[in-house]
Every structure is written in C-alpha cells, then in structure tokens.
Amino acid sequence: MLTITQALHDQIVAHARQDHPDEACGVVAGPAGTDRPERFVPMLNAARSPTFYEFDSKDLLKLYRDLDDRDEDPVVVYHSHTATEAYPSRTDVTYANEPGAHYVLVSTADQDGLGEFQFRSYRIVEGVITEEEVRVVETY
C-alpha cells in the first residue's frame, strides 16, 4: 500500500494538470530504507509528448546525485497519461527500474471529457504489474 500525504498527492495532481496535454513526470523522495514519500521533485518531460515521458539524462543524473547526498531513495516515481487510463503501458514497464518504488499514474483524460480522473499506484518488479491501494493522509 502507498501511504502519501494529501499535500504530496495534490502536488502530483497539480503537476499532471499543469503539463497537460503533455505527460508530466517526477519523483517523490524519502529517507533511504523507508517507504515514506516526503520530498516532491517534479521533473521535465524531455520528450514533451502527450503519449510518452522521458527524464532528461542530465536531470536524472543530478537527481540521483542529490538523492545520494541527502541519503534518500525514490519512493514514488510518477507520471501522467493524458488520454488513457492510469495503467502502466508496455513502455512504462520497460522503464520501471526501481523495484522498491511505487509507480503512480495520474490520468488527466478527464480534462478532455474522456473519462474520470484517476490516481493509481503500482509495484512493477521484473515486468510484473501489481496494483496497490493508495491511502491519502493529512500527516504521517
């Protein structure tokens, strides 16, 4: 189960809506060895695409150096789907290289009248997708 604060949930959703119609992406970091998302780190979608996201390689290197310096892990890796449901695509599964992370997908398709808003979380390990419950709390 992913437990996340309302503030972090709202930041992820706001980023997804802001970048629409392109996919948004980012990370929520937390203390190493914990499963507690704490620090919101929005990233630039280098692909600038409504159907694909890609972290800029320089930004990604900077992020991982920053995580190491702060003794943090990427607890949540998130991105948005702009016209489809919040379910990992084959490409998403291919890019899922953090086995300990929660992969959050936000669908912003509702902005186009294509469906209801969705905020869903998955574990993706060795190509296997497992949806998990999301619990939104005021504080930890």
Image (spheres, rainbow, N blue to C red):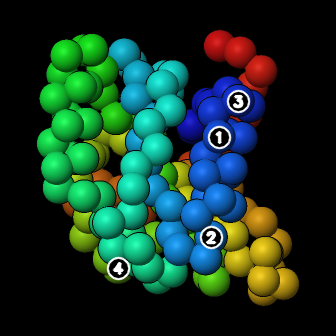
Q: Secondary structure at mark 1?
A: helix
Q: Where is residue 15 drawn, in percent x and y?
A: 61, 52
Contact check, label 1 and label 4, Cβ < 8 Å: no
Please give the name of the residue rendered at 25% of the width and 14% of the height, measured from the top-left corner: 71
| Disc 3 from disc 1: Cα separation | 6 Å
Nearer-N-terminus badge (3/4): 3
- Horizontally, residue 120 falls left or right of residue 26, namely right
Q: Is residue 108 left or right of residue 98?
A: right
Q: Indicate which disc, 2 or 4, sits on the residue closer to the N terminus.
A: 2
Q: Residue beneath label 1, please? A: 11
Say which residue label 4 marks: 90
- In space, the residues marked 3 and 4 are separated at their CA atoms by 30 Å
Q: Which mark is residue 94?
A: none
Q: Position of residue 129 (x, y in %)?
A: 41, 63
Residue tagged by mark 3?
A: 7
Q: Secondary structure at mark 2?
A: loop
